[in-house]
Amino acid sequence: MKKKIAKYAQQYLPLFGVLLAGVIGFNVFSYDLGARMAVVIAMAVGYVSWGIVYHHTKGDLQIAIVAEYIIIAILGVTVVFSLLLRS
């Protein structure tokens, strides 16, 4: 059981690190809309990169999986941008 938890922690800690850095950056640059947008794009790129590396190490990387990660990242960026630009 401990090996399983350690295996998953090793795989998912980089993702949590990217997302945590993004949330911190989003809050630090609360005064600058352009910087917030850059942080959101950086988070999306980090998410897609993590997904590609994760599936490559598992040995099941396919174009469909990469496309799925890109589509989810674009959806997330679109939602956050629409919220940031609504006022």
Image (cartoon, rainbow, N blue to C red):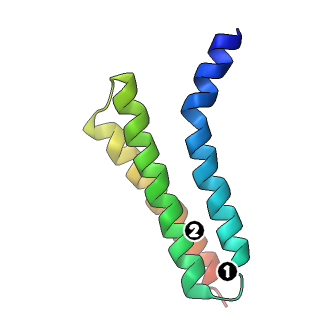
At 71% from the left edge and 82% from the top edge, which residue is drawn?
30
Q: Amino acid at mark 2?
A: Val
Residue at 35 percent of width and 38 percent of height: 65
Determine which residue is flagged by label 2. 79
Q: Where is residue 61 shown, x and y percent of the image? A: 31, 31
* Quarter that holds the N terminus: top right
Image side of residue 31 versus residue 80, left or right: right
Q: Residues within 10 Å of mark 1 (few under 14, many from 20)?
A: some
Camera-side mark, 2 or 1: 1
Per the rendering, the mark at residue 29 is 1
User: Toward which corner of the image does residue 2 lie, by quadrant?
Assistant: top right
What element does badge 1 sit on? Answer: loop
Q: Residue at x 62, y 54 (%)?
A: 19
- Residue 25, percent across and down? 65, 70
Residue 79 % position (x, y): 57, 68
Kind of residue sitting beneath label 1:
Phe
Q: Specify the quadrant that holds the C terminus.
A: bottom right
> What is the quadrant of residue 45 in the picture?
bottom left
Q: Which circle's residue, 2 or 1, is located before the other in the chain? A: 1
Tell me the SS state at disc 2. Answer: helix
Residue 47 lies, in percent from the top left, at: 49, 51
Q: Is residue 63 above or below residue 29?
A: above
Front residue of 7/36: it is 7
Question: Label 2 crowding class (10 Å Cα cut-off): few <14, some 14-19, many 20+?
Answer: few
